[in-house]
Image (cartoon, helix red, strand yellow):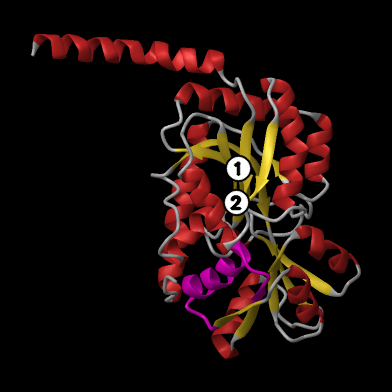
Amino acid sequence: MKKFLIGLVLAVLAAPLTQAGAASDYPSRPIRWIVPFTAGGPADVIARLVAPKISAELGQPIVIENRAGADSNIGHEAAARATPDGYTILYVVPNLVTNPSLYKAAVDPIKELAPVSQLTAQSYLLLAGADFKAKSVADIIARAKDRGVTCASGGGLPGFGCEWLRSMTKADFVHVPFKGNAPALTALMGGQVDILIDLFNTALPQVKAGRVQPVALTRAERGNPLPDLPVIAETLPGFVLVGWHGVMAPAGTPEAVIRKLNAAFGKALEDPDVRRRISDSYIEVAHGSPEAFGRILEEDLRKYAQITQAAGIQKQ
């Protein structure tokens, strides 16, 4: 018994030294970065932009592996099942925290993965058709309560935004999903739908051309690229719809390794060319500690679960 207790104490005392050793030797071989999307998409583009900077910082190749399919669940599972040694990391977007509300087989992002670093933050734009009479969030809500409003999205978080408008206001918002932002925007310009929650890079050219009218931003406070436009939260307190991109690792990856990866991503995101190319798409660079990213994940997981429940959406 005494030998067992002595061994246990020595093991506990040795743990910090083992962590430090793991970090000092890491990495000693290439790192696999799973991107759960097809090549050429927004996540893949950012990953391939950042990867060479990470490689230069860590002294090892970053090998991007596109594992698309099943709304990213295939890539998520591959990362969650990988050896937690820092040699497999995962590119993540908000479907990581929305999928558990939609799919029975989704990975648990809190229990099965560990946060490494946030990369970006991205809000959206609430648009109305050029001939739509409601000009503000309050006007749109009043119209929805009176005769209904169709709310379009190209999928992803904007789709949750339409459902959230309905559940928060108890008004008749009907979500009309499209397969992509472009057809949703075309439907708005053609008058087939009333409002749309859209990305800035697809919406702004049509705003400038006068084909659609901007109503509000989905971020927490007013800001670029339309600093004079109100935010939805000014009318509906708490309505903040912000997407993000980030990096995670299999749960159990040594903390010292995660810290080293986080520092490398932070340095890569400071590169002027990286920052410029990301911001050109109206996306903000956003880097912080693993703990800060973890808090975002936990908050969003709860929020989208509540929205899904209120919408009556059943898991597949």
- Which residue does the image show at 45% across and 65% down from the upper left? 103
CB atoms at circles 1 and 2 under 8 Å apart?
yes
Q: Secondary structure at mark 1?
A: strand
Front one among 15 and 303? 15
User: Which SS does the magenta portion mostly show?
Assistant: helix
Front one among 45 and 136? 45
Question: In which image quadrant can residue 197 be found?
Answer: bottom right
Q: Amino acid at mark 1?
A: Gly
Q: Amino acid at mark 2?
A: Val
Magenta residue check for 232: no
The magenta segment: 152-172
In the rendered structure, the answer to whether residue 310 lies left or right of residue 232 reads left
Instruction: Check the image and name the residue furthest to the bottom.
Output: 147
Q: Which mark is residue 264?
A: none
Q: Secondary structure at mark 2?
A: loop
User: Does any portion of residue 223 appear in the rendered image?
Assistant: no
Q: Is residue 130 above or below residue 33?
A: below
- Which residue does the image show at 65% across and 30% down from the upper left? 265
Please state the horizontal and vertical placement of residue 151, each as a whole percent of the image.
64, 77
Magenta residue check for 156: yes
Q: How many marks are shown on the rendered structure?
A: 2
Residue under circle 2? 93
Please state the horizontal and vertical placement of residue 37, each as a whole percent of the image.
66, 55
Residue under circle 1? 246
First-in-chain label (1 vs 2)? 2
Front one among 140 and 205? 205
User: Which quarter shows the C terminus?
Assistant: bottom left
